[in-house]
Amino acid sequence: MRREVLKGHLDLLLLSVVDDQPLHGYSIIRELRQRSDGAFDLKDGTIYPALHRLERSGLLRSKEIIGEGPRPRRVYSLTAKGQEALRTQSDVWLEFHTAMDKVLEKTT
């Protein structure tokens, strides 16, 4: 998927994935890829800066957990502010999507 199409929608995608359960960065990347049938195959350099930005803005929180593997992992989850942002951004997206469908509809 072209970068310019994704621009402006990354926050909504990340908040939506993390809403289901707390996840670490690689799991978020994998979940986005899986849910989109490969359309959102995003790189670390796209995801991690966005996660850090969302955390700084109070929409996500993170904590380090010790698990399998040599290093602790940072797991991200939604804050109350993040849940509200997810609802608001989802509503805006659905309104936009509906309007776009109407414009793109072909009449017979």
Image (cartoon, rainbow, N blue to C red):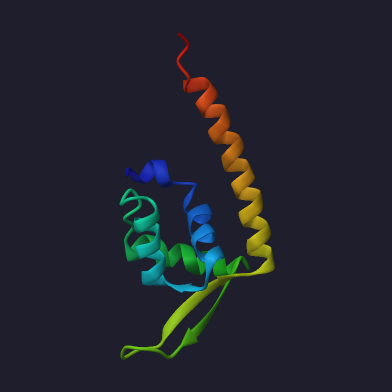
- Say left or right for 11 vs 2: right
Q: Relative to 44, say whether 73 is above or below.
A: below
Q: Nearer the viewer, residue 57 or 23?
A: 23
Pinpoint residue 24: horizontal percent, then vertical percent. Answer: 43, 74
- Quick one: which residue is furthest to the front in this view? 108
- Quick one: which residue is furthest to the top in this view? 108
Pinpoint residue 79: horizontal percent, then vertical percent. Answer: 64, 69
Quadrant holding the C terminus: top left
Q: What's the residue at 38%, 60% (across, down)?
A: 46
Quadrant holding the N terminus: top left
Q: Image quadrant of residue 43? A: bottom left
Question: Number of labelled discs?
Answer: 0
Pinpoint residue 72: horizontal percent, then vertical percent. Answer: 40, 88
Q: Nearer the viewer, residue 100 or 20?
A: 20
Q: What's the residue at 35%, 88% (across, down)?
A: 68
Q: What's the residue at 48%, 19% (across, down)?
A: 105
- Say left or right for 69 vs 83: left
Q: What's the residue at 48%, 66% (across, down)?
A: 51
